[in-house]
Amino acid sequence: MDHIVIDNLTRRYGPRVGVEGLSLRVPSGTVFGFLGPNGAGKTTTIRVLLGFLRPTAGRARIFGRDCWRDTHVIKGEVGYMPGDLRLYPWMTGADGLQIFGRVRGRDLRTPGAELADRFGLDLDVPAKAMSRGMRQKLGLILALVHEPKLLILDEPTASLDPLMQDRLNQHLRELAARGHTVFFSSHSLSEVEQLCDRVAILRNGKLVADESLDSLRTRVHRDVVIRWPSGDAAATTEPPGCLDVDLREGRYWQGSLRGPMSELVSWLAGRQVSDLTIAPPDLESLFRRYYKEESGEP
Amino acid sequence: MSRGLIGKTLREVWVALLLFAAGIMAFEALFAYVWPQFYEDFVGTVLQFKLIQHIFKGLLGTEVGPGIGLTTFAGMAWVHPIVLALLWAQEMTFCTRVPAGEVDRGTVDLLLGLPVSRRQVFLCESAVWLLTGLILVCSGLLGSLLGGLAADKEMRQPIGRLLIVAINFYGLYVAVGGICWLVSSLSDHRGRAIAVVFALVLVSFLLNFLGQLWEPAQAVQFLGVLNYYRPVVILGDGVWPLADMLTLVTVGGVCWLIGGVVFARRDICTV
């Protein structure tokens, strides 16, 4: 079952396009990465999903319900952490848990205290006296505490230290293992790469990729360095079709693997090489390419 | 109604509410106690001047002369700029919190991330707004009664008439508050919303003032909310100003309703 279904969604701000013709499906129980550079339309999409913005065209549904019309019903099972989180200055963590608990109709103080313990947050400090990281932790606790079926996180790790990011990732993986869905927006691949099963990439308000990370990895070029036993061998050997050699220098070849690994391995099996280095798939370069295309850079 | 939302609203406004209520009560009490001591001097000397009579006519909305009775003239306590300023300042700070204030400071994402409809948020906020208005009006009434108790018996204002004034005062609160809700619903910036409402009540005050003194202004005087709030007249004749109160409640109610519809249908952008 898909927890989020977006069909041909368009949202404009006057003449400016937020997102255009976006169609997306997020299956339940997945950790879904929603990537794109700043201004690509990630937050606009999230705000449509949460019923803050009305679509110009198309529709968005969560749990099969319309995100604009039934937003208050949907949010009973949704946890949301905004990208630019602002808290009421007077609100302590304990206040937040009490208010949220009353609105959600359940006592959230005990699970909230457990989460605060896990994330290392003092629940008695008012937001006005909190550091940015502490506020971020409180926002996460308030989004997670009712164990929502769907968690929407808009760049949630911006102010968290690496240790805390690890704890959050672990918590999100545990949630996904229990069948919860995580919709994780970010402009950084590295954090999504560790966590997500599937990613969608937005550029200029349009979807440019929507596939699993494993599938993306197969399409990514790998840097390959081959050391031949002699300069002659390096100079006279013709490379296979799957390998683009960018540099021949003495006994060395340096290039990119553009085809399946098995093809290169078979080709090498019939030859004598002194050394071989194949770098792991560099997803970052793929994403940089997507982002650069957006800005018109070569 | 959501207990959590009402609790959150009360948590946010109770300090300001107490201060405003105490301010109104203290002013009414002081006025009721101190004013009678200066009344005779005031009527005998200051009110002899035509210019002063005109100014007071503008302020009170009725003819003022040396023959005016103490209890009637004491109605000035309810139209005094200090009382109106306290009442309206409380309303402007309260009614512009949601949605203009929430959008302005970005906390609306947290609020509307909860399983509540915008209509529910608006209704909960409005319920507390009506309650705080009641508290302010009762504070004024209590202050007036307490001040009167400390003064000589014959100087006290009749409770029945004071009650009518207080209800008319509440009608004024509803009218201005309704306008505040509408402006707040249309705005993303709290400061701008407050500025617009402030300008509107100031124009209303000036229209009322000028309308008493300058004939051309009388044609548009009906546009100001103070045209439907006449405590001095009520204290003088004791008649319920039903048409005035209906007008105030209708203006406030219609603006409030439109504000609620606008809030329920508008886009919420904080970035």
Image (tube, rainbow, N blue to C red):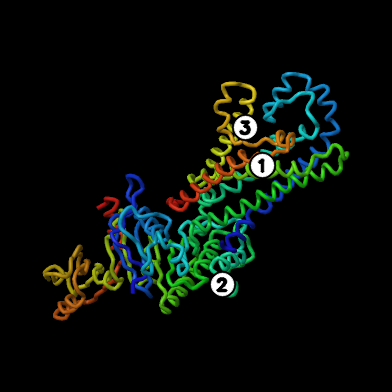
Q: Determine which residue is flagged by label 3.
A: B205
Label 1 chain ID: B
Label 2 chain ID: A
Report whether mark 2 lies on the same chain as mark 1.
Answer: no
Q: Determine which residue is flagged by label 1.
A: B168
Relative side of A69 to A93, left or right? left
What separation in Å lies between label 3 and label 2 (alpha carbons)? 48 Å
Residue occupying image coordinates x 47% and y 71% = A168
Above or below — where is A276 with respect to B77? below
Q: Quadrant of residue B37?
A: top right
Coordinates of residue B137 in the picture (x, y in percent): 70, 46
What separation in Å lies between label 3 and label 1 (alpha carbons)? 16 Å
Relative side of B86 to A169, left or right? right
Mark 1 closeness class: few <14, some 14–19, many ≥20 residues within 10 Å: many
Instruction: Give SS at disc 2.
Output: loop
Under mark 3, the amino acid is: Phe
Q: Residue furthest bottom?
A: A269
Instruction: Give SS at disc 3.
Output: helix
Report whether mark 3 lies on the same chain as mark 2.
Answer: no
* Foreground residue among B154 and A226: B154
Mark 3 closeness class: few <14, some 14–19, many ≥20 residues within 10 Å: many
Q: Determine which residue is flagged by label 2.
A: A106
Coordinates of residue B222 in the picture (x, y in percent): 57, 31
Q: In which quarter of the image is residue A106?
A: bottom right
Under mark 1, the amino acid is: Asn
